[in-house]
Amino acid sequence: MMGSIVLSAPIAGWVSALDEVPDGVFSARLLGDGVAIDPVEGLLCAPCDGEILSVHAARHAVTMAGEGGVELLMHLGIDTVELKGDGFETLVQAGHRVVRGQPLLRFSLDDLAGRAPSLVSPVIVTNGDRFTISSCTVDALVAVGDDLIRLDPVGVAPSPDRAPVGEAVGAIVVVPLPNGLHARPAARLGEAARAFAAETRIVKNGRAVSTRSPVGLLGLSIQLGDEILVEASGPDASQAVAALVDLIRSGLGEGAEHDAAAEPRASSAGMPPFAPVPDGALRGNLASPGFALGTCHRLDRSEPELPVQGKGKEEERIRLLSAMDHLRSRLAISSEVSPKAAICSAHRALLDDPELEAAALSRIAEGEDAAHAWREACRASAVVLRGSGSARFAERADDVLDLGRQLVTILIGELDETLAFPPGTILLADELLPSQIMQLGAEVTGIALANGGPTSHVAILAASMGIPMLVAIGDALAGVRAGDKAILDADGGFLLPAPGAAALAEAEAEVAARQARRADALASASELCHSRDGARIEVFANLGSLDDARRAVSAGAEGCGLLRTEFLFLERESAPTVAQQAELYAGIADALGGRPLIVRLLDIGGDKPATYLPIAPEANPALGLRGIRVGLAHPDVLEDQLRAILSVERGGALRIMVPMVTGVAEVREVRQRVDRISAELGLAQRVEVGIMVETPAAAATAFLLAPHADFMSIGTNDLTQYVLAMDRDNPAVAGGIDGLHPAVLNLIAQTVRGAQSVGRWTGVCGGLAADRLAVPLLLGLGVTELSVPLRQLPEIKALVRGLSISDCKTLALEALQLESAAEIRALSRAFVETLP
């Protein structure tokens, strides 16, 4: 038997597993197994001796037969077929014999990087039935010629086509694929053919190739408009031919994508044309639910012109220090645990940075104006932070610039304690900073942003304040005039400026109806929540402070589904003591009066660092040391928190929730610590330990995690950004984030099924729990607990009381078949509008 075959790296670059390729055909291994390389040089070489089988017409893919009969596909980038060969130079043709390391293709990295969705290049063994990959290089930088994949033959004789069984049937079809039959449609064709017992073939110009051979299909060089014969032999040959012909005529998923890509976007928010909005309305993404009618006022974030020269060194020094004291007192708003308090604390710590103060005073000593000196010192600090290579420090740069803006406005007298707007304001801005939104009062009834993401920190603050907000409206927002009336329907995803008389009257009626519904909801908020058909659905509150807990009870909260504890740990010189933590937890538990209290363990790292828990700079903190990983890396901090929580256990009402879980071992480790400390404290009752499902790993393996967790709570904000690979605080992509994306919805369904398999309940504590269009879908999928911001709590309870779980299940099943978040939202909107 032949020995092992070693394939060399055909491209220099970073090697990763196929799972990381942003294309389901490759990551699902529909074409075969292998690896992917993110190239650092623009040259593709032969990974072994062999013969070139095909070079695609778009010059982005090469197939070859190598040593021992191995068949290989090398595919440069993702969706590079759309470039029609531009940027690629072929050095070989089909039929050429090549030797290991021989150049096959040249390509321009700089050119392709700006035109292709990804340059990650799969290297695939397409006849995996004949070989097993015994070892391969991953997560490493390789040069051309380095060992990449080791293959072992499995001893199966080659059989590219089985002998026909029975009479062959066939049909001719004209290929509608705009880019021909390249790797992705070839994989889909092969996958469809495997559903039939018949042997299926594609014939072009008299040459027949099995649909089971992707390399053979690519070698046929099938192009747009070609006539091909779809042929089959076997017991279900006719059905196979009919199905494959229909699939090819439908475009194999390529035609629809091509057409959609050719259509202009309706707006920068990327909302599809089938989401109905009134004529003249601007589309946006829901960030905080609600409906508002008001007058537009714009927040101008342009930098004021400042004099460079000061009026005297001592006078400017005193001005700066006085303004810093003024800002310091403004930032000392509260010792409470809340997002608002955390932002103030962070800015106060920056204000006390001696190096920042010294840099500004040094400029003043050289004769500069205090405001100019401070702004330039902040800008210089921000440049250093952004150049650090750390995403966490880059985010700190935004905090420094925000602090710079706040102090400058005090120095020039443009801002006092709050941003002032007339009552009934709909605030328009390109972006909002957290420090700005937390200054807004009740006079702002709605917010519309050109940029921003629906799960950003600003969006969370807006929801907690009960302000409807749309984000990612795009450049069109600049055309809305200040002083115009406008309708902001955050639930419907649009802003309608200058509405006509009829639209205005409808909006006024809608506002009145919503106010009446809210009054009714508040009146019955204290009652336990059941669906229309009697199912018990718990509606809890997300809390971040003792004051929140007090208000939650009066708002009708049936408990706390998420107590955020990280703000107690941030912007401090050392971790809070057990006693300090216990005092807070006890106060909240007492305020809830025996209702369930779910305390989330410390969730820092990533975008929430703590100086006393040093975390080395990370290229991608969101995927680094955060959540329970930090706790397990610092067991003293974890055990202190567990001891504080368990010391205030209130007769079974208290539960513990573990953040950022990815595997069973993490849950077991926390469970063991909880049991040990409970025994030390003499607790007779077992304390429940549940998990946050906010990583794709946790959702995909819910059936493995559920036996070790007492409950599951889905954090839809983080889950959505991880599933969609979109940073919720990155304005370039955040507008595309929607928790009702089919991928997210399917993972929620998978989580619920995993929990139900062992009798566990599933809740949702992320943004979808307060989204009126998401709630019916969540309940239909089997979610039985919702934890929402206080402002939305009465309305969500009222909504649930009007829902039939049976109807919700039907809705959810239909939604799981749809292809986009916009389609799912349109379906759910139609459903909600029919409710009594």
Image (cartoon, rainbow, N blue to C red):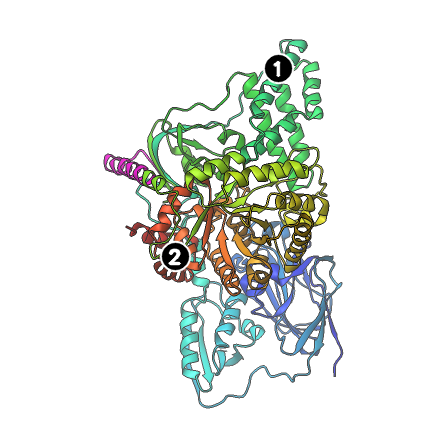
Q: Earlier in the sequence, mark 2 or mark 1?
A: 1
**Labelled disc at residue 322:** 1
Task: Find numbered disc 2 in the image and state the secondary structure of the residue it sits on.
Answer: loop
Label 2 neighbour load within 10 Å: few <14, some 14-19, many 20+:
some
* Residue 243 x/y as whole percent: 42, 75
Name the one closer to the observer, 421 or 539: 539
Q: Which amino acid, mark 1?
A: Ser
**Labelled disc at residue 535:** 2
Residue 21 in the image: above or below residue 281: below
Taking the image as shown, residue 253 lies to the left or right of residue 46, namely left
Name the one closer to the observer, 56 or 440: 440
Q: Quadrant of the N terminus?
A: bottom right
Work out how far the residue at label 2 is from the one at label 1, CA to CA, in angstroms: 60 Å
Q: What segment is highlighted magenta in the picture?
A: 496-518
* Image quadrant in which you'd find residue 820: bottom left
Residue pictured at 68% horizontal, 22% vertical:
357
* Residue 575 x/y as whole percent: 69, 37
Task: Find numbered disc 1 in the image and state the secondary structure of the residue it sits on.
Answer: helix
Decide whether residue 504 is among the magenta residues.
yes
Q: Which amino acid, mark 2?
A: Ala
* Residue 130 x/y as whole percent: 65, 79
Mark yes or no: residue 462 visible: no
Mark yes or no: residue 707 visible: yes
Taking the image as shown, residue 142 lies to the left or right of residue 340, namely right
